[in-house]
Amino acid sequence: MTEPDEPIRDDHAELLRRRALTEDAARPDAVERRHAGNGRTARENVEDLVDAGSFVEYGRFAIAAQRFRRDVADLIARTPADGLIAGTARINGDVFGDERSACAVLSYDYTVLAGTQGALGHRKKDRLFEIIDRLRLPTVFFAEGGGGRPGDTDYPVVSALDARAFKLWAALSGLVPRIAIVKGRCFAGNAVIAGCSDLIVATEDASLGMGGPAMIAGGGLGDVPPDDVGPMSMQEPNGVVDIVVADEAEAVAVTKRLMGYFQGATAAGEAGDQTRLRTMIPERARRAYFVAPIIETLADDGSVTFLRERFAPEMVTALARIDGRAVGVIANNTRVMAGAITAAAADKAARFLQLCDAFGLPVVSLVDCPGYMVGPAAEAEALVRRASRMLVAGAAMRVPLIAVILRRGYGLGAQAMTGGSLHEPLLTVAWPGAHLGPMGLEGAVRLGLRKELEKIADDDEREERVRQATAVAQENAKALNAAVLFEIDDVIDPAETRGLIAATLAAAASREQPPGGRRFVDTW
């Protein structure tokens, strides 16, 4: 072992000198510009994300492949790691231990050639992606950058379309959880890295698009400022990103939380007063209400993370914990479209069910659904295909599903919320005020009594007949009547819901899941 006062060898000294050149301190001007733009450096983000001392870096001495047009010393000083920091690490090790916290982390470095994708960077990605596959490592990728780099000269290329990185990254779908973080400008190949990920966390100043300004102008589509290509005002409501945050510090905190859902169970958490659930559903059948507080009350305190909140808000998707177990939650939002399932809502739910199924997260479905949205405007959105996608995703699920009918469970929409049938979930229960039916009750009455109603000339008398028949149907549709015929498993006190979910999940966890082939998670 070298003594502290013993002179180091020349080769060791050269290593230390070169290694220092890969650190932020070697490029204070670049760091200052990054900070001036309210950003953090790639190394600062990685350090914040991973457990202290756990990062094992790959390829730190790589440089941009531009030796034919730039001095090597300049490349060493100005293009460390070829603009891509990558390695293995641990995240949340204090909660989950070394084995379950093992992960991979990659980050484009925007201070190096605008985070563009260089020749050695692609090779580095290939190497990491193969290690991720081999070791089944959950992965976080900071994807900010301008796409492919045309300035590399060291390797002769015609098209560079033989690069394997995108295929290797896409092939990890459904194999390991992958979270992308996007800050600032993220275009072309960098955007594909984000788009192929399972979850995208973006800062509010991000601009995300399949082509940047140069590509747009080159295609004859005009001059578009980079921040106008795909701002969060566009990409959040259209469902491209899952969570929008203020800055990179918050993005890292949210990502650590998201990663935790895929790392396993924790100690059972505290929960709110469950008796509050008894009064969270309005007595008036048509009165809308917030479903988020119901989810938060059922879950462990502080454990809920809502996804894609501004996209198809009529369908709520969230990750949470119940008694320490990570779960996915889908719920109808009666404040938008009365909770009906639109084409976009079906897409949102189907993709979320795939995500949960791929990574072993049980699903809790909170149902208050009048059915699928119908009519010409709805059909113009390709409703038949998109609505059916939710049924296909539900039928393919291998993880436990638990359904709770909060108020209304009508028609095919309710079936889609329960995996295709009330008897598909491991447990299907209803709250006392719930009603079930093959379609909306008033619509069913008008359809069933159509000929009779046509014979009533007086409008007021006809509507009174509809009200009377609907009241009878309403009485018949009560959850207790459905339970009498064993269409559902039980009608419960809402305050019992959390306990029943936890008990059912515990029973399911004690049984091995049936074998099944690996499935990918749709990008949409």
Image (tube, rainbow, N blue to C red):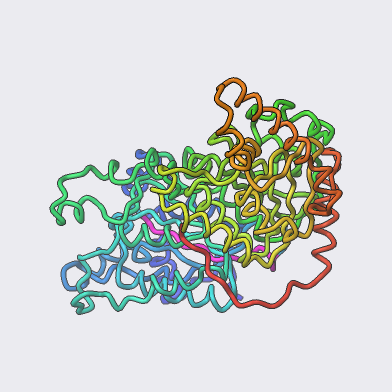
What residue appears at the point 35 percent right and 38 percent down from the top-left corner? 36
Residue 93 shows up from this direction: no
* Image position, residue 79 (x, y; %): 31, 62
Residue depicted at x 36% and y 59%: 190
Could you tell me residue 522's position as x and y percent?
A: 49, 63
In this rendering, position of residue 91 left or right of residue 60? right
Q: Position of residue 262 (x, y in %)?
A: 65, 60
Q: Quadrant of residue 72?
A: bottom left
- Residue 60, quarter of picture: bottom left
**From what the image shows, is residue 349 above or below residue 159?**
above
- Residue 108 among those drawn in magenta: yes
- Residue 478 lies in the magenta-colored region: no
Residue 82 as seen in the image, left or right of residue 336 = left
**Left or right of residue 299: residue 29:** left
Q: In this view, does 238 lie to the left or right of 189?
A: right
Viewer-proximal residue among 406 and 294? 406
* Residue that appears at 71% across and 28% down: 468
Write the start and end of the magenta stretch as one range: 98-109
Q: In the image, residue 201 lies at what x, y percent?
A: 49, 49
